[in-house]
Image (tube, helix red, strand yellow):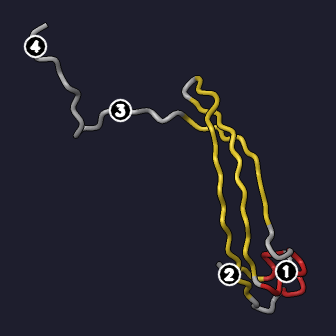
Amino acid sequence: MQKPGEELGLHQFNGHGILFPVQAITLGINQTFVRAYGNNLALGLQGSLFIADKRLNAIYGEYPMSAEVYIRFSPHLMHHHGPHQERQQDHSGH
């Protein structure tokens, strides 16, 4: 990905049209710890390692990193049978 200086908070590059290549690797995990009233509550953690243009090393360092902890609230996904999925019926006569 390429970002202009303004997007990186480098105001000295405003209006110059200079783009800086920036790459990132992000890993994360979350765990649902409450399921109630048709909703889920999860806790998550993710971290990123950025590989940026060497011209940015003096400002951001050689390998900038970030991390975040978050809480996710979402509706519980319901499983239902669609028109092409038929329930098995007991044909044994009981």
Report the mark closest to the observer, 4 or 3: 4
In the image: residue 88, left or right of residue 22 = left
Report the mark closest to the observer, 4 or 1: 1
In the image: residue 59, left or right of residue 93 = right
Count of marks overlaid on the render: 4
Residues at circles 4 and 1 in contact by the CB criterion of under 8 Å: no
Q: Is residue 13 above or below residue 33?
A: below
Task: From the top left corner, tell me how far across and down residue 33 is, in percent.
Answer: 64, 30
For the residues labelled 4 and 3, the Cα–Cα distance comes to: 25 Å
Residue drawn at (23%, 27%) of the image: 87
Q: Element type at marker 2? A: strand
Amino acid type of the residue tagged 1 in the rendering: Asn
Which residue is denoted by mark 4 in the rendering?
A: 92
Within the image, what quadrant is residue 82 found in?
top left
Quadrant position of the N terminus in the picture: bottom right
Task: From the top left corner, tell me how far across and down residue 73 is, in percent.
Answer: 65, 37
Quadrant position of the C terminus in the picture: top left
Label 1 CA crowd tier, 10 Å (few <14, some 14–19, many 20+): few
Residue drawn at (76%, 52%) of the image: 68
Which residue is denoted by mark 1 in the rendering?
A: 57
Task: From the top left corner, tell me how far across and down residue 22 is, in percent.
Answer: 71, 77
Residue reaching furthest to the top: 94
Q: Earlier in the sequence, mark 2 or mark 4?
A: 2
Which residue is denoted by mark 2 in the rendering?
A: 2
Report the mark closest to the observer, 2 or 3: 2
Report the mark closest to the observer, 2 or 4: 4
